[in-house]
Image (spheres, rainbow, N blue to C red):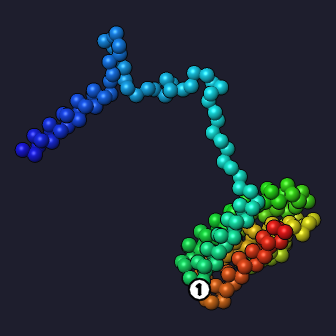
Amino acid sequence: MLNQVGIKIVLVFGVCALVVGCEQSEGSNETKPAVQTAKETQPKNTKEAKAPAPASVPSASELATNYKAQSKVLIEGIKAKKPDNEIINMAIALTETGRQFLPGLIKKYPACKAYLEAVDAVALTMKDLPVEDIERDYHQDGKLPKMADGNCYHGKDLVVHPATVAALAKNGIVTDEQRKSAENEIAEVLAHLMALEH
């Protein structure tokens, strides 16, 4: 009995789909599909077609707001003893936000171009380095070009500090001392952000 009811329902839906799917053209026995093809839906005048809008680039103010908010969440995560993989992901996201500042800083401080481009080139892989190497080569500028303007330093730290936290978490943030060290990295970078805002 249930099978007969099921068959009737399928037949009813099939007939409905057939009726809805085709419409009768006035003055003609020819049927047309109700759904137009992609070609038929294109605008006739190519001037009407518009290219998709480019993704908006956040302003320096929006970036600063985002950076501060992400920093706060990261510090809270460190204090709450979130799993290392979560800390790594938050730190990588903050590193990416820091990288977004670099083109604007290069434009504002052209003397920082080589320095900040060198930081950007290693930003995504820095977390894979030993923390001591990050300290020597990037915090202390061992592998970076000569800095021509003090503002270069502030821009660099927006990337290097969160990358350092990712490296710390990759090794495991277990002790209170390690946790405090990770928190301090982010607290310090917020001071660099403030210096750039003024």
Residue 133, located in which quarter of the rendered image? bottom right
Along the viewing direction, whichever of 102 and 196 lies nearer the viewer? 196
Residue 165, located in which quarter of the rendered image? bottom right
**Residue occupying image coordinates x 37% and y 23%:** 33
> Which residue occupies the extreme front position in the image?
26
Residue 85 appears at what percent x and percent y? 56, 73
Residue 89, located in which quarter of the rendered image? bottom right
**Residue occupying image coordinates x 88% and y 59%:** 109
- Say which amino acid is labelled 1: Val
> Which residue occupies the extreme right position in the image?
148
Along the viewing direction, whichever of 62 and 18 lies nearer the viewer? 62
> Which residue occupies the extreme left position in the image?
1
Q: Which residue is mark 1?
A: 174
Along the viewing direction, whichever of 124 and 75 lies nearer the viewer? 75
Residue 46 appears at what percent x and percent y? 63, 24
153 vs 107: above or below? below
Q: Secondary structure at mark 1?
A: loop
> Which residue occupies the extreme bottom position in the image?
176
Along the viewing direction, whichever of 165 and 11 lies nearer the viewer? 11
Looking at the figure, which quarter contains the C terminus? bottom right
